[in-house]
Amino acid sequence: MKDGMLDLETFGTDPDAPVIAIGCVEFDAEGIGSTFYRIIDLSTIVGNPNMDTIRWWMNQSDEARNIFKDSAPTVSIQQALVDFSEWVNTTGIKRVWGNSASFDNVILRNTYKECGLKAPWMWWNDMCYRTIKNLHSGIKMSTRSGTHHNAVDDAISQAQHLIEINNLVKVGL
């Protein structure tokens, strides 16, 4: 499996948005592989929070907001980035898909830079799930599992949908 579907939860929508959770799943045309998930200790976030996004979080489901509970296992942003790099290198992921050409991948790459680290994939391997999804809007996601706005659950659902699209129109997985 050489593809990874990335999903972030953030406190903003700009390229410098603070990352509060990282989820990713490795996948290929045959299915889903291993997953990665880290919740970030909010005292270590970097970037510029957006108050509208923080208010938006207040209106999400209890399940989605569980990442803010004291009982949620968290790591520093630096540790999450190191862990993610190790996971990407271990899995052999080359292409990283995000749900927008200007969101997940850009924000995470910017966070790596802000922390003085190098992203574990090359920029030319940034892929856009949203573009494929919109080009094939007639192919709806057949199943949605997990919690909306949980980074790893969203990554899994998006990867499953991309696999469904690929099985019908061969987008190159």
Image (cartoon, rainbow, N blue to C red):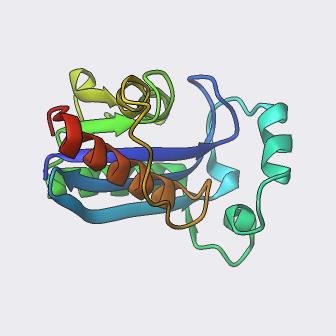
Image quadrant containing the C terminus? top left
The percent position of residue 53, horizontal first and vertical second, equals 77, 37
The percent position of residue 144, horizontal first and vertical second, equals 50, 60
Farthest residue in the front direction?
A: 138
Q: Nearer the viewer, residue 106 or 170?
A: 170
Q: Nearer the viewer, residue 39 or 172?
A: 172
On the image, which quarter does residue 136 sit in? top left
At a point 65% along the width and 28% down the height, the residue shown is: 13
Q: Nearer the viewer, residue 125 or 133?
A: 133
On the image, which quarter does residue 95 sit in? top left
At a point 38% along the width and 40% down the height, the residue shown is: 139
138 on left or right of 32:
right
The percent position of residue 2, horizontal first and vertical second, equals 14, 46
At a point 23% along the width and 54% down the height, the residue shown is: 27
The percent position of residue 110, horizontal first and vertical second, equals 47, 27
At a point 70% along the width and 29% down the height, the residue shown is: 48
Count numbered badges in the picture. 0
